[in-house]
Amino acid sequence: MTEEQHLREYTKALKAHLPRHFFEPVPARLAFLPAFLALFGLCTWGILATPYILLKLLLSFGIGYAFIGMGFLAHEILHGAVTKNPVLRSITGTIAFVPLMVGARLWRKWHNVEHHGSTQHPEDDPDAMGTLESATKRPIVQWAFRQVPALRSFFLFFAWTFWFTLHAHMMLRRFFPDFKPNERPAVIFQAILPPLVWLGVLLLVGPLNFLFVFVIPWVIANFIAMSFIATNHLLNPITETNDPLLNSLTVRNPRWLEWLTLGFGYHIEHHVFPVLSPKYAHIVAAKIKELWPERYNELPHWKALVYLWKTPRLYRDHRNLIEPTTGKVFGTMGFGLNDAKVFPRKAEARRQRRKTRTQK
């Protein structure tokens, strides 16, 4: 892997190869919103109508998909990939983020400005993991890294069931002072609206049905969201320069699943062109691979999840992760993180088999 390049170098080169209409909003994508709301309404009706717990649970998974689908759509809308109309963008983005309880204005500040502007920067990216040096100053991190790696990985994956929403509320506390006085009422309104909506639903459907109408779907949506967000960045090096081919990872799923998740796994492409509709992401991916094949990082989604389970979430330096309980060092994407490092026993078995065949 060569040294860091700035985002501008990629965008300038790619725009010469891509049609202009790729950078225009795709309003047809807004049709997903009523579809997801209809799915939520239909499954909610089924949960209220049936006395069977297993059927309620099955319908709850349908709502979980509607919730995460709305989350992915909110991400598109608030980047301007669906509409340029600021009022329509704000209203639809607010509605789409109600299940995950994130405010639209907060998201644009936290995600669009801070995360995209400083991706994987050790101090400036609000979503980046810490370094070994910074971990020594945080008691909860010190406690976590005293646990055996498998238990720590379990805690990490379990935390995904609520972390996206919790992190959003942490970001509200962090960035609220940055909003101008005239912006703060809208930020506060968007923060309290989702809990009020779900409190109203609780009063309407009762505690048992609320478990299936909201709690279980909310857990599912949080987990799926974090399974993408974590794999999109946390295996990559931390960077001082905003280099999306270095600090981001595209994760691939079967095509039908990529359609259901609105192409969210094409994350390198998204960080190169945040306003680009995921509708065109696969074309941009092919062009990036053509222009910078040695820099492009891509994994099957399932394998990226295994990599996350097998590696620590603490940086020894910009290019390497470290397991503090053993001192074992793992590279990052593009800097030595591969199957041989993550699955050393399998790699050794393959070497032995090749050695045996050679001797024969």
Image (cartoon, rainbow, N blue to C red):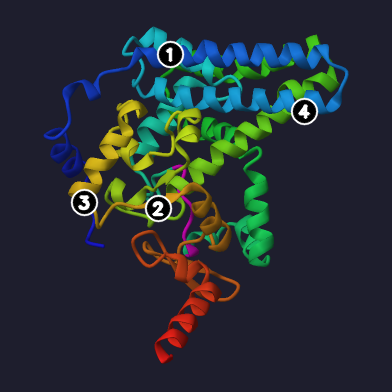
In front of the other: 28 or 232: 28
Measure the alpha-carbon separation of dots 4 and 1: 28 Å
Give coordinates of residue 149: x percent, y percent: 63, 65
Majority secondary structure of magenta residues: loop
Residue at 34%, 35% (x, y): give it: 270
Tag shown at residue 292: 3
Name the kind of residue labelled 3 in the image. Trp
- Callout in the foreground (2, 4): 4
Please, which residue is most extreme toward the front here? 360
Q: Earlier in the sequence, mark 2 or mark 4?
A: 4
Say which label, 4 or 3, has the lower sequence index: 4
- Report how far apart the C-alphas of labels 4 and 3 lie in the structure: 46 Å
Residue drawn at point x = 43 percent, y = 48 percent: 233
Within 10 Å of disc 3 (Cα), the crowding (few <14, some 14-19, many 20+) is few
Q: Which residue is mark 1?
A: 30
| Quarter of image, res 318 | bottom left
Q: CA distance from mark 2 to mark 1?
A: 35 Å
Q: Nearer the viewer, mark 4 or mark 1?
A: 4
Q: Which residue is mark 2?
A: 122
